[in-house]
Image (cartoon, grey):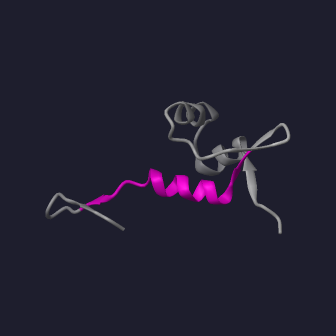
Amino acid sequence: MAIEATSIADFCQAHGISRGTFYNLKQRGMAPTVMKVGKRTLISVEAAAVWRRAMEEPVANTQTGEAQQP
């Protein structure tokens, strides 16, 4: 079984953010979980998916002004 993971540079490119933004998010505790494999730092596809869900904002209901859960 192969574990799918990507480098920080590839993660940033895929998500349209800069490496600086990634490290700012990491400093604030808002970056995806990373793993060390030898000297490489990788982000698993599962960690990226969890991060994307955490970064989503609830859609505001335009009639009531309340947030709706997806």
Asked whether, in this view, residue 39 is left or right of residue 62, the answer is right
Image coords of residue 41 (percent x, y)? 75, 41
Q: Residue at x 62, y 46 (%)?
A: 33
Q: Residue furthest right?
A: 38
12 vs 59, left or right, is: right
Q: Nearer the viewer, residue 69 or 12?
A: 69
Q: As rendered, which of 39 and 14 lies closer to the eye?
A: 39
* Magenta-span inclusion, residue 56: yes
Q: Residue at x 59, y 37 (%)?
A: 22
Q: State whether residue 46 is above or below residue 19.
A: below
From the viewer's perspective, is residue 9 above or below residue 23? below
Q: Quadrant of the C terminus?
A: bottom left
When the figure is inspected, residue 15 is found, relative to residue 19, above or below; the finding is below
The N terminus lies in quadrant: bottom right
Q: How many marks?
A: 0
What x and y, as percent, mark residue 37? 81, 45
Residue 6 x/y as whole percent: 74, 51
- In the image, the segment drawn in magenta is 42-60
x 22%, y 63%: residue:
61
Q: Is residue 1 above or below residue 14?
A: below
Q: Position of residue 35 (x, y in %)?
A: 72, 45
Q: Residue at x 70, y 42 (%)?
A: 8
Residue 65 found in image quarter: bottom left
Q: Is residue 57 magenta?
A: yes
Taking depth in this image into account, of 16 and 55 the one nearest to the observer is 55
- Give whichever of 12, 50 is nearer the camera: 50
* Left or right of residue 54, residue 15 in this image: right
